[in-house]
Amino acid sequence: MRDAIPSLTIVVPCYNEAEAFIYCVDALKNILIDLISKQKIQENSHILFVDDGSKDNTWLQIKQAAGQSSYVQGIKLSRNRGHQTALIAGLSAVDTDVCISIDADLQDDTKCIEQMIDKYIQGNDIVYGVRNDRSTDSFFKRNTANIFYGSMSAMGVNQVENHADYRLLSKRALAALLEFKEQNLYIRGLIPLLGFHSDKVFYTREERIAGESKYPLKKMLALAIEGVTSLTVTPLRLICGMGFLTCFLSFLAIIYILIAKFSGHAVEGWTSVIISIFFLSGVQLLSLGVIGEYIGKIYMETKQRPKFFIDEKTND
């Protein structure tokens, strides 16, 4: 149990969220005011919006909200860097006892924020927000999500199923997360590696409050590839296994061909040869593609480039 009342930062990455912003800021401000009145968080608690190079007037709305309320702060990245980098940028700016990350679309139940604070006070350094009902998702979205989590688990990526980036981190858990310096970020796979005491809160996924989803199928596939190649070498091991299997099948084929040759039953034709060439060529190209993905990540990591640049802050 923790006795001291914590200060809280709610980190909200935003990309073209002009339509949803007004609903998001009002909902989160009401949560802060309620928790402060209940003396569960300190009065210096606030919301930190991170504009990930939006093309609409999201940043203008953030600045206006910050000028009207002491509960709102904002930072603007110099260009669009993606959700995971924007989230890390926001987390890097946190200077409070705890932080909670949440998306601006309000599909994650904001009422769970109080439950997360309660679990932090009970002694947890990490509290995961986990969806236990995706009935508001389309059939396609729901099933691709299940395939996504199943595939990631099969590849050896340790993550909490049906948990995205809605979570609480204590100050020491956040400090540990920021120790990871890799360029290729998959935060939901890094959090379990921290090893601190954790718990979960469960909620029903709501419909998007406004605007369009920022995670279509293309980005979901990119995120899955990022997670697998950043956290596990299972694909490389699969290539090794596939190589052994191919060699074994080729060895059997050689024995069969020699037996047929010496018994006088060899059948002339190109079918088997062509099939073999195409099969082995496909295996080689696939293997080179997977290996190339890993080599590309090594190349990017060795450059040690900055993950982001902050263009503007609301308190400048």
Image (cartoon, grey):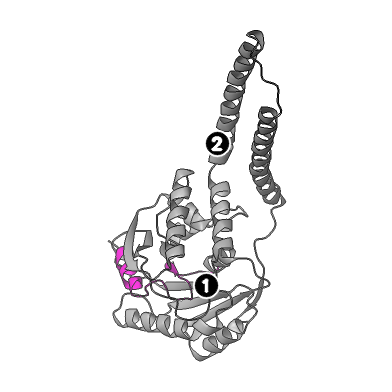
- Which is nearer the eye, 271 or 68? 271
Left or right: 45 in relation to 250: left
Say which residue appears at 57% left-offset and 52% top-offset: 225
Q: Label 1 sits on what residue type?
A: Ser
Residue 241: % across, % down: 55, 31
Query: Which of the numbered marks, if any, corresponds to residue 213?
Result: 1
Question: Taking the image as drawn, is residue 191 in sight?
Answer: no
Q: How far, Cα to Cα, is label 1 from label 2?
A: 34 Å
Disc 1 element: loop
Image quadrant in which the C terminus is located: bottom right
1 and 2 marks in contact (CB < 8 Å): no
Say which residue appears at 65% left-offset and 70% top-offset: 80
Residue 260: % across, % down: 62, 13
The answer to whether residue 234 is above or below residue 36 is above
- Which is nearer the eye, 2 or 277? 277
Disc 2 element: helix
Left or right: 157 in relation to 37: right
Category of crowding for the residue at label 1, using alpha-carbon neighbours closer than 10 angstroms: few (below 14), some (14–19), many (at least 20) = few
Q: Residue furthest bottom?
A: 68
Residue 214: % across, % down: 55, 70
Instruction: Quickly name the residue at label 2.
Output: 238
Q: What range is drawn magenta here?
A: 93-119
Question: Along the polypeptide, which appears first: circle 1 or circle 2?
Answer: 1
Residue 104 lies in the magenta stretch:
yes
Category of crowding for the residue at label 2, using alpha-carbon neighbours closer than 10 angstroms: few (below 14), some (14–19), many (at least 20) = few
Say which residue appears at 53% left-offset and 55% top-offset: 186
Q: Residue furthest top?
A: 262
**How many circles with numbers are drawn on the protein?**
2
- Which is nearer the eye, 77 or 53? 53
Say which residue appears at 33% left-offset and 82% top-offset: 34
Residue 88: % across, % down: 55, 63
